[in-house]
Image (tube, helix red, strand yellow):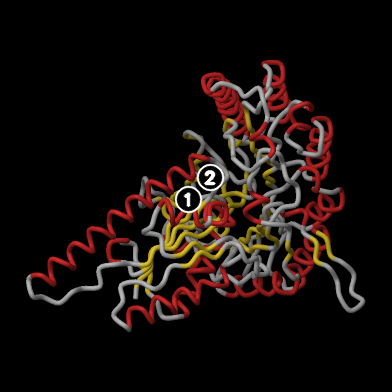
Amino acid sequence: MKYFFETYGCQMNTAESAALTLAAKERGWEQTDNADIADLILLNTCSVRETAEQRVRGRLAHYAALKKKREKASREAEHEGGEAQAPLFTLVMAGCMAERLGEKLTQEFPAVDYVMGTSARSRFPLILEAVEKAREQGNAAPEPLVETDEKPEFAFSSLHLEEQGEQTPFRSFVPIMHGCNHFCSYCIVPYVRGREISRSPESILEEIRLVGERGVREVTLLGQNVNSYLWKGSAGKKDLDFPGLLELVGSSLSSQNLHSPRNSPDGGKGVRWVRFLSSHPKDLSHEAIRVMAKYPVFCHHIHLCVQHGSDRILKAMNRQYTRSQYLDLVSRLRAAVPDLSLSTDILVGFPGETEKDFETILTLMDEVKFQYSYMYHYNPREGTPAYRLPDRISEEVKRQRLARVIALQKEHTAQLLKSRIGANVTALIEGISRKNADELIGRTERDEMVVVPGGTESIGCFANLTLSTLRGNTFRAPALQKLM
């Protein structure tokens, strides 16, 4: 039997799709890249923005039409005396949109067979079993089910490198916590992901070890708010916070000789680089910064979501920090890790945002100079506190303000990247360049992309490179030296 997945939204969704893929393969299912021949189609969805949900609705309409087409073909085959083929496939909705809308999805799209909320991932093997039994009994599809109201404990599962979706075989996501307790006024995530649940440090270290043995060179520790990680100790053991986890990861990789000093040509094997996201400025502590600077295994890039530059708007967003506190955090990070690169999220057009408020975004960007940003305008999400706020900004003004932010970010990105020409860097060679089969594409620890001549034998290796020229936002290097 064959399955086909579509994944939308954040890296956590990608990681969770990987876990669902593993569950399907363990039951002997086969992945296909052609939805037209799949026995099961799963959409792992996002609710952060209305545009993401509208895109999924379009896909649901497509699959509803596909079901009708298969039904018609089957009836015609029966009428002509042929054998009725199993025309239907099982359509599963998973993720945040499934959690948010629940039964409303099946009412709007009767073609959906299963609605599987964010905490119900452990039910997926039962869905597969039900589909298998339905096929054995000659039924087109199993009984429909909506699984969102019951809140089973979120279950983390180890991922394997071949299940990492769009990730290369040499990079892997390792979820360390799930959910969010912050309730930013514009954000739907706490309502669809639930409260924070942290994963045991033993299982995190074990997964890093396992993927390293299988060829992964870089892992990203994942969480909706990764630096609020907190593992409650038991049987006399102390609680472990995010800095404590970073210390464990850094010291573990050091003791196993799985990383080497920067730019060393004779490093060991396994995981060498560690990243983490997403980081909430309120929770990125002095101690976490100290540990990050202490161990070379932690990449010198952080995605630090600022959202806005106005204290008044930050308060209305319930971000729980001020502009000056954010800028102080940036200063402390750069003092501890001088070559650190930063990226961020910026939200314009929040209800009540004046032109003066908006301009504080631009001045903050000028002061910090992010390497890149995810920029978007406010999108009302029903069920969040901000949805009820007055003084909404017109779509035209939001688009104009967003265009100004994008233009400024492009200017900063160009300046920062141009200043890096001539730098000697280490990059993980990830694969073959899409534009030239004789070139390789790599990523530096500062999250810069670089193209370099070379053959496939270097893929998955670290290389010393000199950033010689820049085309768009991608560097070029004249040659590489394999490290490990």
Relative depth, front residue between 250 and 68: 68
Query: On the rendered image, what quadrant is the C terminus found in?
Result: bottom right
Above-or-below relation of 180 to 339 = below
Of residue 180 and residue 467, the one placed in the foreground of this image is: 180
Amino acid at circle 1: Ile
Q: Can you identify the residue that label 2 sits on?
A: 449
Instruction: Residue 163 in the image: state x and y as whole percent.
Output: 49, 67
Q: Dots 1 and 2: beta carbons under 8 Å?
A: yes
Q: On the image, numbered disc 1 is attached to which residue? A: 441
Q: Quadrant of residue 121?
A: bottom right
Q: Is residue 90 placed above or below 8 in the rendered structure?
A: below
Q: Which label sits on residue 4?
A: none
Sort mark 1 into few (<14), some (14-19) or many (20+) by Cα contacts within 10 Å. Answer: many
Quarter of the rendering occupied by the N terminus: bottom left
Q: Is residue 247 left or right of residue 119?
A: right
**Residue 110's quadrant in the figure?**
bottom left
Amino acid type of disc 2? Met
Which residue is painted at 49% across and 49% down in the image? Answer: 479
Residue drawn where x is 49% and y is 44% of the image: 52
Horizontal side of 212 relative to 366 (left or right) equals left
Q: Which element type, helix, strand or loop, lies under badge 2?
A: strand
Q: Secondary structure at mark 1?
A: strand
In the rendered view, would you say 119 is above or below 305? below
**Which picture quadrant has residue 264?**
bottom right
